[in-house]
Each structure stands twice: as structure tokens, then as C-alpha cells.
Amino acid sequence: MADIPLLVTSQNSSSERRISPHWTLAHLKSRLEPVTGIPSFSQRLSVFIAHSETPILLTPPDGRADDDYTVGEFRNALVPFARVQVDDTRPVSSQENYVDVSGVEKFELSQEEYAKRDDTVLAWKKRNQLGRFAASSDVAKVSPRAVLTARGIQIGQRCRVAEPSERRGVVRFLGSVTELPSAGATEDDAVWVGVEFDEPVGKNDGSFKGVKYFEARRNHGSFFRPDKVEVGDFPEIDDLFAEDDEEV
């Protein structure tokens, strides 16, 4: 079985990792300890997967021990690009990174006082008519093709799509797609971004309704609106757990 790419998060960390389905749950926790700073015996692992609001708790059934249960046996939870949340079960006061600042004097402002200042981010947004201070007519004028240009999206660039979980690949197509809803207010503005993913986490092979738009392997292709795609230095996710000589 191939290694599983995951996003590992905790209160103080977030990183992309690859784990082996052959590891025991106990071994996985031992590898997560230096990543999260949480002792393996104090870890509670919850998995969040796309299209599900309910996390799955990684606990061996039937009272089995962590070292008797392999990661691969959680096949319905530990799917590629799922998010594993690592929580610390120790009392807050016993956690090494715990800092009680309740007795520290802090500079505080009410919302009204903050709104009156002219040296804040809020004031800067007002002056430049950004965010919720932008005129509604200006917002409506931002077309998908303008977003495409602003983001500098071009065919052949490495990219990532962050929702519902991060996926990486290469931009393979830019343009309109027959039978897909127009991504713009006018036909000229209708533009979609075709992405070939590194992993089989897409919805097609670069085709839609029988029309081929770009070459991709099965389940490696998808189409997105420009505002969902970010281009940049996004290499394929490496085995970040392979930081020592252990077999992975």
C-alpha cells in the first residue's frame, strides 16, 4: 500500500506529512510527538475528511492497544489529504507550552475606540475602499478573467487548490468549458482553470461531458474558477516524515 499524504495540525503546529499504512497507531503517535510537542501517551487523534462535518476519532476498537492496530486499518478515515488534528489530553496547566497571561497587564481598546483611530488596518481599508468598504458596483465588476490576470495564472505553472483540503498539481487548461455554468458575467469572461493533480484526488481525466480539454490520468483532473487556484512554488508533497534512516 502507498504512503498516505495528510495535513497534521495541533494547537501550535501545522504541516504536511506522509505516513505508512503499515505503521502501528503507537508508532504514528511516536512520530507525531516531535512534530507537535505532545507526548504520545497524551495524544488524541481526530480525522477530518472532505464532505463530512463529523471528525473520526482514531481509537482501536474492541479495547485493542495502539501497538496492535495499524494505520491501514483506519482505511475509511485516513484517506489522502485528510486532516489529522492532534489534541493534548493533559490538563492545560500541565502542558509544557502553557503560558498563563491572565495576570499580565495588556493594552486593550474597545471596538468604538479602535474604529476612531487613523493608524489601524481598519482605517487603511476605509481609505482605500477595500473589503467590506468597497463599493458594491466595483465588486461586481471583478470578472473571473480579471482574477486570472491578477493571480498570474498561466498554463504549465505549479499550483494548489486549498478547499476542501489542499491539493497540488499543474495548470493544464485556461478557457471556457462547454456545459459548465459561465464563470463570468459575459461569455468573454467565462473562464475555467483545468488542473492536473499529482495524486488521484480529482474528478475526471481532463474531460467534461465527453469533451477532452487537457490530458490527465483518471481522477487526476478537475476544473476550477480562478479564485480557487493559487500558483507558485508548490512542489509535490514529499515524505516529510522521512527525516531519519527509518523505513517508511
Image: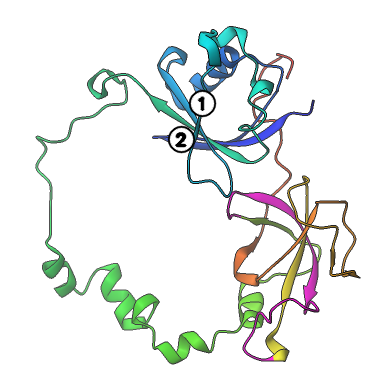
Quadrant housing the N terminus: top right
Q: Amino acid at mark 2?
A: Ser
Location of residue 185 in the rendering, given as x and y in whole percent from the top left corner:
62, 89
Q: Residues within 10 Å of mark 2 (few under 14, many from 20)?
A: few
- Please check the rendered image and state whether residue 170 is part of the magenta-colored stretch, yes or no: yes
Residue 152 vertical placement versus 203 (above, below):
below
Q: Quadrant of residue 79?
A: top right
Q: Is residue 196 left or right of residue 111?
A: right
Q: Which residue is mark 2?
A: 13
The residue lying toward the viewer, choosing from 94 and 57, is: 57
Q: Position of residue 51 (x, y in %)?
A: 57, 50
Secondary element under disc 2, as helix, strand or loop, is strand
Which label is found at residue 35? 1
Quadrant into which the C terminus falls: top right
Along the horizontal axis of the image, is 54 left or right of 204? left
- Residue drawn where x is 70% and y is 57% of the image: 159
Q: Which residues are magenta?
A: 162-186
Give the amino acid type for the residue marked by disc 1 in the picture.
Val
- Determine if the magenta segment contains residue 37: no
Closer to us: 15 or 211? 211
